[in-house]
């Protein structure tokens, strides 16, 4: 997927979708679909100490960030959203090792920052 589906908002340091994004959750051609409307704003944030591994503006990871943020907005568990982050990264030809490392880092980072058990149970 090329970068034509979103635009960078430098004044906010975020991205915004410009087209409808349809993501099959869990597996290719799944009946469980995540729809992301045009105008959805998302961050492609990476902790500063990890930017030497992953550039937050690398197009290979923008779909990952978008899907991840939308799932968090819809109150999916962070590790579930990170699993979809991983799948989107691999779909966009990210290296297996980098995608796996970052999916684990995203899971830990998000769980630590956002953990609130009452949201899920």
Image: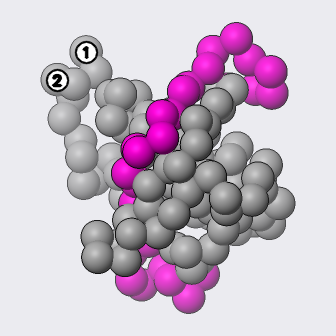
Residue 105 shows in the view: no
Judge the density around disc 1: few (<14), some (14-19), many (≥20) Cα neighbours within 10 Å. Answer: few
Instruction: Please name the residue shown 23% across and 41% down the image.
Output: 115
Quarter of the image where one finds residue 15: bottom left
From the top left corner, tell me how far across and down residue 69 is, in percent.
42, 45
Task: Report the span colored magenta.
Answer: 26-53
Q: According to the image, what is the colour scheme of the structure?
A: one colour
Residue 76 shows in the view: yes
Instruction: Please name the residue shown 37% across and 77% down the image.
Output: 10
Marker count (numbered): 2
Q: Is residue 111 magenta?
A: no
From the top left corner, tell me how far across and down residue 51 is, in percent.
50, 83
Looking at the rendering, in which quadrant would you find the C terminus?
top left
User: Can you tell which mark lies on residue 118?
Assistant: 2
From the top left corner, tell me how far across and down residue 107 is, in percent.
45, 50
Instruction: Please name the residue shown 35% across and 73% down the image.
Output: 13
Q: Residue furthest top?
A: 31
């Amino acid at each position: 997927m090329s970068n034509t589906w979103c635009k960078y908002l430098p004044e906010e340091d975020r991205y915004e979708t410009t087209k409808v994004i349809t993501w099959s959750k869990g597996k290719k051609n799944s009946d469980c679909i995540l729809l992301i409307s045009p105008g959805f704003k998302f961050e492609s944030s990476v902790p500063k100490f990890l930017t030497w591994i992953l550039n937050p503006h690398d197009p290979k990871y923008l779909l990952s960030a978008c899907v991840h943020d939308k799932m968090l907005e819809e109150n999916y568990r962070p590790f579930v959203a990170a699993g979809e982050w991983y799948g989107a990264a691999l779909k966009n030809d990210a290296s297996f090792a980098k995608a796996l490392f970052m999916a684990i880092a995203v899971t830990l980072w998000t769980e630590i920052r956002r953990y609130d058990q009452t949201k899920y149970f």
